[in-house]
């Protein structure tokens, strides 16, 4: 492995370790997963949003968001409500128990990686996205899903 590839691999591992440590801290403090805490933070900022809007805010597939919400709802952290204006629309809300969990969460509540990415200048993000797309293209494995499932970051 050439020195540049070696350094890049070291940086990926460092980022992964930092994210993993943050997620462990979230679970230890809150008793909820990092993804659940992130979803609850979005709901606290945007009460009444729909599942598709939550999925977009978290950059995950709507079915992943729905599964995440099902677990959080079962734990009493979020609730779904039908819109008074349109019964077909389901709105999401944080419960008091969900707010209590969110209040215990370490910063950044949206996750370490999403927070860091949100603070990068657009030019850096565009270069990074292009470079990661190139890397992802080189890692294509036959039979792997085109849109892999969400992992907590």
Image (cartoon, helix red, strand yellow):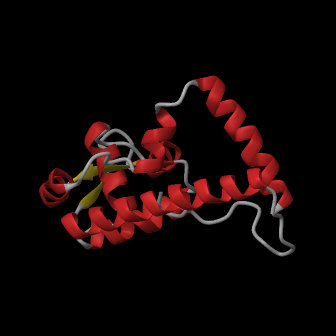
Q: Nearer the viewer, residue 107 or 36?
A: 107
In this view, the residue in front, 68 or 150, is 150
Residue located 78% across and 72% down the image: 144
Residue 15 percent across, percent down from the top left: 52, 55
**Which residue is farthest front?**
3
Position in image of residue 112 (x %, y %):
41, 49
Viewed as shown, does residue 22 lie left or right of 133?
A: left
Asked if residue 124 lies left or right of residue 72, the reply is right
In the image, 151 versus 84, the foreground residue is 151
**Residue at point 85% right, 58% down?**
138
Tell me if I can see residue 76 in this picture: no
Position of residue 84 measured from the top left corner of the image (x, y, whole percent) = 29, 43
* Image quarter of the N terminus: bottom right
Q: Is residue 112 visible?
A: yes
Count of marks placed on residues: 0
Q: Residue at x 21, y 53 (%)?
A: 102
**Residue 133: percent from left, percent from top:** 77, 47
Please name the residue shown 31% across and 42% down the image.
48
Q: Is residue 37 left or right of residue 114?
A: left
Q: Nearer the viewer, residue 17 or 95?
A: 17
């Amino acid at each position: 492995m050439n020195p540049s590839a070696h350094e890049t691999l070291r940086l990926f591992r460092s980022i992964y370790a930092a994210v993993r440590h943050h997620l462990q801290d979230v679970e230890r403090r809150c008793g909820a997963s990092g993804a659940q805490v992130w979803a609850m933070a979005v709901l606290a900022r945007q009460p009444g949003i729909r599942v598709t809007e939550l999925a977009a805010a978290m950059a995950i597939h709507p079915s992943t968001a729905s599964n995440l919400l099902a677990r959080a709802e079962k734990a009493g952290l979020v609730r779904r409500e039908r819109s008074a204006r349109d019964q077909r629309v389901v709105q999401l809300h944080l419960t008091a128990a969900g707010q209590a969990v969110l209040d215990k969460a370490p910063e950044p509540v949206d996750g370490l990686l999403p927070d860091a990415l949100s603070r990068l200048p657009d030019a850096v993000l565009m270069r990074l996205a292009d470079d990661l797309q190139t890397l992802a293209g080189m890692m294509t494995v036959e039979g792997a899903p085109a849109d892999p499932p969400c992992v907590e970051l």
